[in-house]
Image (cartoon, helix red, strand yellow):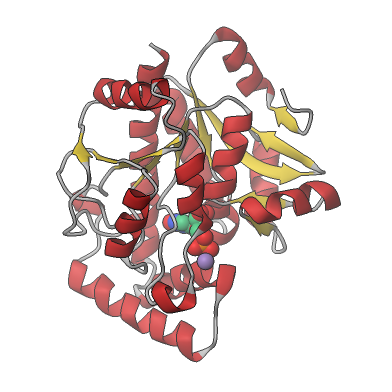
Amino acid sequence: MNELIQLSPEVAAAREQGRPVVALESTIIAHGMPWPQNLEMARQVEDIIRIEGAVPATIAVMDGRIRVGLADAELQQLAQAPDALKLSRRDLPYAVATGRLGATTVAATMICAHLAGIEVFVTGGIGGVHRGGAESFDISADLQELARTPVAVVCAGAKSILDLPLTLEYLETHGVPVLSIGQDNFAAFFTPDSGLKADFRMDDAAEQARFIRAKWALGLDGGVVVSNPVPAAAAMPREEIDAITAQALAEADAQGIAGKAITPFLLGRIKALTGGRSLATNIALVKHNAVAGARLARALQG
Ligand code: PSU
Ligand code: MN
């Protein structure tokens, strides 16, 4: 294995015994949710994956190395670090070279998972084409990564702050299949239904695993999106989240927020404007994805 990668003892043992491992990102901890809910979420998601019979591997950059699997004290450090970097593909070498603490986005987590031989990764929502992306060129590096790196990403769709039709167009152009669990349509993060069709509905983990194996056996590089809608009981009302998203986007525009700061800004504003209810939804959907991801990792192993 690459000498810049360091597996935790739990992940190393799982790899040796051929047990299923599920990667987890850390940007959602350091930049996506506030303290202390971020730490509680990270711990609970890891526990759910263990209960479902797989081994969690939260990924971050610490002391110049890519860490795959974190100890509880390290999760805590990340959850409280005010100055953790947000690392996408372009930023990974900077954190490794300087020794700075870095949290990995979907794109960077996929890269690290693949380097560590992990095939399944659980997150909340993937990045995508931002609204106005045709003008601003703000297209998350997550999409390019899905096009090139062979990791299955279990998510609750892409956030409604994005342009979801353009996000799906981009994925199609780059040959990234979108599988959907439990419904025909692509999920919309805070709400179950984006109103847009996913490519293939596959409720069953064994079916998803066969699809993924077939893709890679054909030499088709790149990832797979597994869209897992937020449970209805935990979802936000659609009209409310749409109105609040519009307001948060207008504020971001007025304040000139751009680049990698925009996703954390919008998530923070949406949380404030919903009185914290969006955060409860966000946590619920990540936990729900952890179950689906662990089952998929087991199916891929079996
Ligand atoms: N979805 C969430 N919370 C997050 C993110 C996505 O629910 O914090 C993060 C992920 O790490 C994703 C990143 O990869 O936002 C996308 O950022 P950008 O749009 O700058 O590429
Ligand atoms: Mn961006």
**Vertical relation: 242 (above or below) 221:** below
Q: Is residue 37 visible?
A: no
Q: Position of residue 30 (x, y in %)?
A: 60, 56
Residue, x 62% and y 10% (percent of image)?
16
Image side of residue 133 versus residue 166, left or right: right
Say left or right for 186 vs 70: left
Above or below residue 126? Residue 175 is: above
Q: Give the percent coordinates (x, y) of residue 238.
A: 20, 67
Please, which residue is most extreme toward the bottom here? 254
Residue 239 % position (x, y): 19, 73
Image quarter in which the C terminus is found: top left
* 232, 90: nearer the viewer: 90
Name the outermost residue toward the top: 17
Q: Quadrant of the N terminus?
A: top right
Measured as percent of width and height from the top left, residue 234 is found at 25, 53
The residue sitting at 49% across, 67% down in the picture is: 263
Residue 240 visible to an observer of this rendering: yes
